[in-house]
Each structure stands twice: as structure tokens, then as C-alpha cells.
Image (spheres, rainbow, N blue to C red):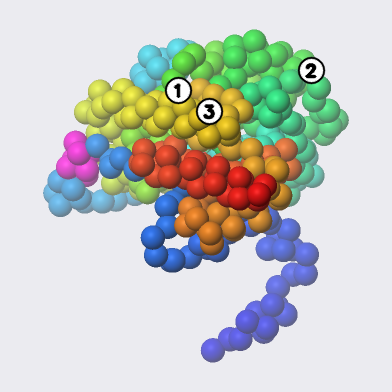
């Protein structure tokens, strides 16, 4: 058997495998390991099952049909259904040739970045933000730069403050946002669109939480800046379909046409059972989305109410299913997250996993069951008050 040190010797020093940051979310999950009796609030994993009509349709199809290669950008009928959803839900015009089916939102983001970044170019990313695009930039040989989401202002960005490098090609925008749950007001979205247009930047708008909002409806960036926006969507969160791995891009047809070469090289196509699931979601299960969103809203309301009662309240998340809890008075977030596991049996993600601006916070997932959310907040409050005694 090949030893670990033999393998290490063969690897390129300071190559991609060394440069790539590890996900802090996976790191804390690994630290928690399989200890018994833990309350898990670290992943954005809906506790609700994939709606039954979707599961039934796929089970039937797998038994009855040949599962074969499909067109690189996804079957025509699915792209037509998606275009209709975008027109209706996201509120901007889209046709089937402006849709590209991808391996989850993650696969969509990677393809979008690959389409617009050349090696050495810069890309602007949110801090705090979902960390995967940082890794994607490294894989593509691009340089990530960050813009701040201000914790003192409900984790909103101020595009007037951004330093845009001369070689910057794109900005990634994520609203409703992970890890904060903030939803950018229309005027913030308009300021980003305005800046991108003036500087000739692509906007890669990560809208995987487009249907999970509780107050104001999120603004689709493509409505404000259609010529320069590539929008990223997913079935993962809306339909509790994280493991099915299906998402899609919406963008200018000429760009998506050229993207076929990239998708063909890295994935060939998405999986046919997942495409069948997506079609069933849009045709048979879209009526179940409001009830799922209502469940997340009730968890958000509970979390905000309990955060207020426990003296942990800072802001109200308006979408997605996360809450950032300020634990800065107890120390660095990695340390606090480890103590929370060891002393209170609760797993939350250290804010540092999402960037330096969140280093004093823990992220808890409100996609977990209500009693787990409640238990997590009480545990954090106890940990903080014990530190002060
Ligand atoms: N974008 C954001 C902001 C996310 O939080 C996630 C998943 O957590 C994704 C994209 C990727 O989602 P998917 O499961 O569709 O790959």
C-alpha cells in the first residue's frame, strides 16, 4: 500500500491542493464526529423530507425507464418549465435557451465563474459569505477579494465603499444570504447593478434561497441588470432536495451556449433521476413550498423571540434559514464552537468559516427542528453567562 508520506512527496508543493482552504463547516462537523446525543445546527439541511410526489415519480421512473445520458444543458422540457418558474416567481423574462441545468447551485456557481474568470483575474465575494466560491476562485486560478457585509447594519453591503481591483471581472451577490439570512433591499441591489454596469463587471447572483423569505420579496439581480447577470438557483433548499444535486443557471443565451464546452468537460450532464425529480417538483410539488416556508418562518420567529429573551438579539433574518449569534464576548468563534460541543452537546458553525467579518459569531441553522433551535440558543446563552461568572 502507498504510504501517506510517499503521496505527500509526489504532490506539487504550494499547488492547488495546498492553496485551497478547507470548509470550516465540515471542520466543525468533523470535530463533533459521531459523539452521541448532539444537537446539530451546523448544516443548512432542511429537516423536512423531499415532498412525496417527487420521490414517488422518481422511484417509478427508475423502475420503468432506461437511465441514459441527457443533453449537456438539460432536457428541453425541464428548461421550459424552469423558464416559466423564473418568469412567474423571480419576475423577469426568461426562455428555455437562457436556462442551463447544473449539478446543484454549487455546480452552477462553478460554471458561471468558469465562464467569466480568466486565470489571474479578480473576483469580488461577500464577507461573511458561503465559503465555496472562494475555493472555486482558487481552482480557476483567479484571485478572490472581499466586500464587507456590515454586522452593525443587518449584514448589508455598501457598494459605495467597495474597492474594485482593475482586473476584477465579476462580483458574487447572495441574497437571501447564507450565513446571515439578510435580504438586500431593492436600493442596495440597484446600487450593485449600477456599479457593475459602470465597471463592466459580471454579476453572479446566487439566488438559491429565492423562495425562502419571510418579509420583503428578494430582488432578482437579472431584473435590474439583465445583460450582465448570471443567476444561480437550486432545488436543494426550496424542495428539501439537497442530496439530489440539481440546480440551474439563468443568463444570456450566447454565454450559456459557450458554457456547454465547460460543462461537457467537467460533468457531461446532470443526472437523469435528478432531472425527473426537478420536473416533478415544478409540476406537482410547487404547491407545497408555501407550507415549508411557513415552517421556516415559524422557526425564524421562535429564534428571534428567544434570542431577545436570552439577551442574544442583534438583528432579524428576513430569508434563507440561518441566524448569526454574537458570541464575541466569549472569545474566538472556533474556540466557542468547540466548547459548545464539549460542554453543551450543541454543534453550531464558527462565523470564521464565512470570513473575518463574522469571526465573533456562531451561525445556527434554522432549517433544524424547532426544539433543536430552542435548545441551541439556550445552550449558547448559558455558555456566555458561565464565562462571565
Ligand atoms: N449558495 C449558497 C448561498 C448556499 O448556502 C448553498 C448551500 O448551502 C449553495 C449555494 C449550494 O447549494 P446546492 O446544494 O444547490 O449545491
Does the magenta run of residues contain 53?
yes
Q: Earlier in the sequence, mark 1 or mark 3?
A: 1
Q: Magenta segment range?
A: 52-58
Q: Secondary structure at mark 1?
A: loop
Do the CB atoms of the residues marked 2 and 3 lie less than 8 Å apart? no
Q: Quadrant of residue 315?
A: top right
Do the CB atoms of the residues marked 1 and 2 lie less than 8 Å apart? no
Q: Residue at x 59, y 58 (%)?
A: 338
Is 35 located above or below residue 216 in the figure?
below
Q: Secondary structure at mark 3?
A: helix
Q: Earlier in the sequence, mark 1 or mark 2?
A: 2
Quarter that holds the N terminus: bottom right
Percent position of residue 347, x then y: 50, 53
**Mark 1 against mark 3, which lies toward the viewer?**
3
Q: Quadrant of residue 89?
A: top left
Is 8 located above or below residue 253 in the figure?
below
Label 2, label 3: how far apart the Cα atoms are: 32 Å
As drawn, which residue projects farthest toward the right?
166
Which numbered marker is on residue 160? 2
Prevailing secondary structure of the magenta residues: helix
Mark 3 = which residue? 308
Percent position of residue 340, x then y: 55, 54
Which numbered marker is on residue 213? 1
Q: Nearer the viewer, residue 303 or 87?
A: 303
Percent position of residue 115, x then y: 62, 37
How many residues crowd around disc 2 within 10 Å: few (fewer than 14), some, or many (20 or more)? few
Amino acid at each position: 500500500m502507498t504510504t501517506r508520506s510517499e503521496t505527500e512527496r509526489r504532490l506539487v508543493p504550494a499547488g492547488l491542493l495546498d492553496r485551497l482552504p478547507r470548509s470550516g463547516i465540515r471542520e466543525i462537523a468533523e470535530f463533533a464526529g459521531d459523539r452521541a446525543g448532539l444537537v446539530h445546527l451546523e448544516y443548512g439541511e432542511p429537516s423536512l423530507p423531499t415532498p412525496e410526489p417527487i420521490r414517488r415519480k422518481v422511484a417509478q421512473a427508475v423502475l420503468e425507464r432506461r437511465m441514459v445520458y441527457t443533453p449537456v444543458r438539460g432536457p428541453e422540457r425541464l428548461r421550459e418549465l424552469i423558464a416559466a418558474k423564473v418568469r412567474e416567481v423571480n419576475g423577469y423574462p426568461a426562455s428555455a435557451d437562457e436556462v442551463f441545468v447544473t449539478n446543484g447551485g454549487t455546480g452552477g456557481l462553478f460554471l458561471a465563474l468558469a465562464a467569466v474568470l480568466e486565470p489571474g483575474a479578480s473576483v469580488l465575494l461577500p464577507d461573511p459569505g458561503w465559503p465555496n466560491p472562494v475555493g472555486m476562485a482558487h481552482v480557476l486560478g483567479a484571485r478572490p477579494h472581499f466586500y464587507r457585509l456590515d454586522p452593525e447594519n443587518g449584514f448589508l453591503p455598501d457598494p459605495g465603499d467597495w474597492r474594485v481591483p482593475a482586473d476584477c471581472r465579476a462580483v458574487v451577490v447572495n441574497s437571501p444570504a447564507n450565513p446571515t439570512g439578510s435580504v438586500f433591499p431593492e436600493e442596495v441591489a440597484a446600487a450593485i447593478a449600477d456599479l457593475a454596469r459602470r465597471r463592466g463587471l459580471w454579476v453572479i447572483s446566487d439566488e438559491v434561497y429565492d423562495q425562502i423569505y419571510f418579509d420583503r420579496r428578494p430582488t432578482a439581480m437579472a431584473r435590474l441588470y439583465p445583460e450582465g447577470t448570471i443567476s444561480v438557483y437550486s432545488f436543494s433548499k426550496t424542495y428539501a432536495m439537497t442530496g439530489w444535486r440539481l440546480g440551474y443557471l439563468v443568463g444570456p443565451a450566447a454565454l450559456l451556449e459557450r458554457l456547454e464546452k465547460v460543462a461537457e468537460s467537467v460533468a457531461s450532464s446532470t443526472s437523469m433521476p435528478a432531472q425527473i425529480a426537478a420536473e416533478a417538483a415544478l409540476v406537482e410539488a410547487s404547491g407545497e413550498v408555501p407550507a415549508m416556508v411557513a415552517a421556516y418562518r415559524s422557526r425564524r420567529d421562535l429564534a428571534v423571540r428567544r434570542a431577545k429573551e436570552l439577551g442574544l438579539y442583534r438583528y432579524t433574518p428576513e430569508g434563507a434559514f440561518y441566524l448569526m449569534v454574537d458570541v464575541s464576548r466569549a472569545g474566538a468563534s472556533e474556540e466557542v464552537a468547540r466548547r459548545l460541543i464539549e460542554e453543551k452537546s450543541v454543534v453550531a458553525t464558527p462565523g470564521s468559516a464565512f470570513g473575518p467579518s463574522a469571526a465573533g459569531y456562531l451561525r445556527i441553522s434554522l432549517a433544524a427542528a424547532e426544539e433543536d433551535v430552542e435548545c441551541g440558543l439556550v445552550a449558547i446563552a448559558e455558555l456566555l453567562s458561565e464565562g462571565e461568572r
